[in-house]
């Protein structure tokens, strides 16, 4: 009943920028924390950034000063602005939304994940 649609990935040169978007669909009642994770080949999935309902943000040390996470509650969306991209940023990026949806008149909690969008940073 809840789906997350990601967009914005692609191929970019080192030093370039990309903006990732993730929009949740369904009867969303509220969204607590939204975040972005990434997984590089042969590595574990790691947190890139997240943002709480009161707009507190948290970033991985490797992306501080380069990435900015934001949210739009009216659109059930979370964004990741990525600047000064490096080859080591290459990974599949997954959005995550910890939310409550209304299903059959009942509130249900979901830990929802997007399908992943590929980011390749290469010259």
Image: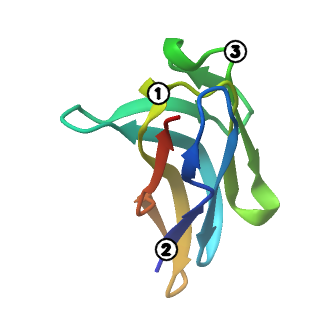
Residue at the location (54% across, 49% down)? Answer: 11
- Does 50 appear above or below 6? above
Alpha-carbon span between mark 1 and mark 3: 16 Å
* Residue at far bottom of view: 104
Q: Which of labels 1 and 2 is toward the front?
A: 1
Alpha-carbon span between mark 1 and mark 2: 33 Å
* Residue at far left of view: 42
Label 2, secondary structure: give it.
loop
Residue at the location (59% across, 22% down)? Answer: 58
Q: Front-most of 8 and 99?
A: 8
Q: Which of the numbered marks, if any, corresponds to residue 2?
A: 2
Instruction: Look at mark 1 in the image and give the residue it sits on.
Output: 87
Instruction: Give the percent coordinates (x, y) of residue 47.
Output: 43, 30
Residue at the location (52% across, 11% down)? Answer: 61
Label 3, secondary structure: give it.
loop
Q: Front-most of 77 and 99?
A: 77
Q: Do the residues labelled 1 and 3 touch (CB within 8 Å)?
A: no
Q: How many residues crowd around disc 1 within 10 Å: few (fewer than 14), some, or many (20 or more)? A: some
- Does 120 appear above or below 3? above
Q: Front-most of 11 and 83?
A: 11
Q: Which of labels 3 and 2 is toward the front?
A: 3
Instruction: Look at mark 3 in the image and give the residue it sits on.
Output: 65
Alpha-carbon span between mark 3 and mark 2: 32 Å
- Does 72 appear above or below 57? below
Q: How many residues crowd around disc 2 within 10 Å: few (fewer than 14), some, or many (20 or more)? A: some
Residue at the location (46% across, 80% down)? Answer: 1
Q: Are marks 1 and 2 in contact (CB under 8 Å)?
A: no
């Amino acid at each position: 009943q809840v789906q997350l649609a990601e967009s914005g990935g692609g191929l970019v040169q080192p030093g370039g920028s990309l903006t990732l978007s993730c929009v949740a669909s369904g009867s969303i009642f509220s969204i607590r924390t939204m975040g972005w994770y990434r997984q590089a080949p042969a590595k574990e999935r790691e947190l890139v950034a997240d943002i709480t309902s009161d707009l507190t943000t948290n970033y991985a040390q490797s992306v501080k000063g380069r990435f900015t996470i934001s949210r739009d509650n009216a659109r059930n969306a979370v964004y990741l602005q990525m600047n000064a991209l490096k080859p080591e940023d290459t990974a599949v990026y997954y959005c995550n939304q910890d939310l409550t949806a209304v299903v059959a008149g009942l509130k249900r909690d979901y830990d929802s994940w997007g399908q992943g969008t590929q980011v390749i940073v290469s010259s």
